[in-house]
Amino acid sequence: MYVVLKAGGKQYKLEKNDEFLINRISGKESSVIKFKNVLLVKEKSSYHIGKPYLKDAYVTCEILSHPRARKVVAFKYKRRKSHKAKIGHRQDLTKLKVKEIKI
C-alpha cells in the first residue's frame, strides 16, 4: 500500500515506515502530525483517487528531527564591472516518519 501526499506545495509517494524530508514545519521532535491532503491511495490492486483530495483519508507522521540541508552557493559575477557576489543558503527541513495510512 502506498499513498501520494501533498505537503508544502510538493507531492510525496510514501509507504508505511518511510522517512522523508519536507520544508520546516512547526512541532517538537517525537510529536505526531496528521496530513489530510491525500491525493491517491493504492492498496493491493485497487486505486482510490481524490478530486483533488480523498475525503476521510489521512497520513499520520512522527517528527524525527529538524535538520538543515546542504549549503547552496549562488555566485553572481558581472564582467568588467568589478562586481562579484557570493551568497549562501541552507534550507530548514523537517524529517518525518510515516506511522499510519488511513483511508
Image (cartoon, helix red, strand yellow):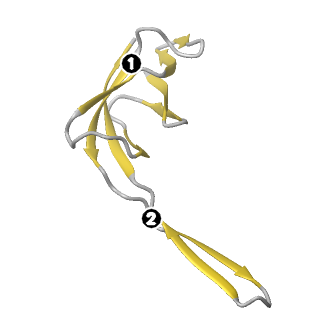
**Residue 42's spot in the image, x, y percent?**
50, 17
* Residues packed near mark 1 inside 10 Å, few (<14), some (14 to 19) or many (20 plus): many
Numbered circle sitting on residue 58? 1
Q: CA distance from mark 1 to mark 2?
A: 31 Å
Instruction: Report the residue at 53% width, 16% height from top.
Output: 53
Above/below status of 32 relative to 91: above
Residue 98: quadrant of the picture: top left
Numbered circle sitting on residue 70? 2
In the image, is 88 to the left or to the right of 96? right
Q: Nearer the viewer, residue 26 or 81?
A: 81
Q: Which comes sooner in the sequence, label 1 or label 2?
A: 1
Above/below status of 83 relative to 100: below
* Residues packed near mark 2 inside 10 Å, few (<14), some (14 to 19) or many (20 plus): few
Residue type at numbered disc 1: Tyr
**Residue 60's spot in the image, x, y percent?**
31, 25
Residue 64: quadrant of the picture: top left
Numbered circle sitting on residue 7? none
Above/below status of 60 relative to 24: above
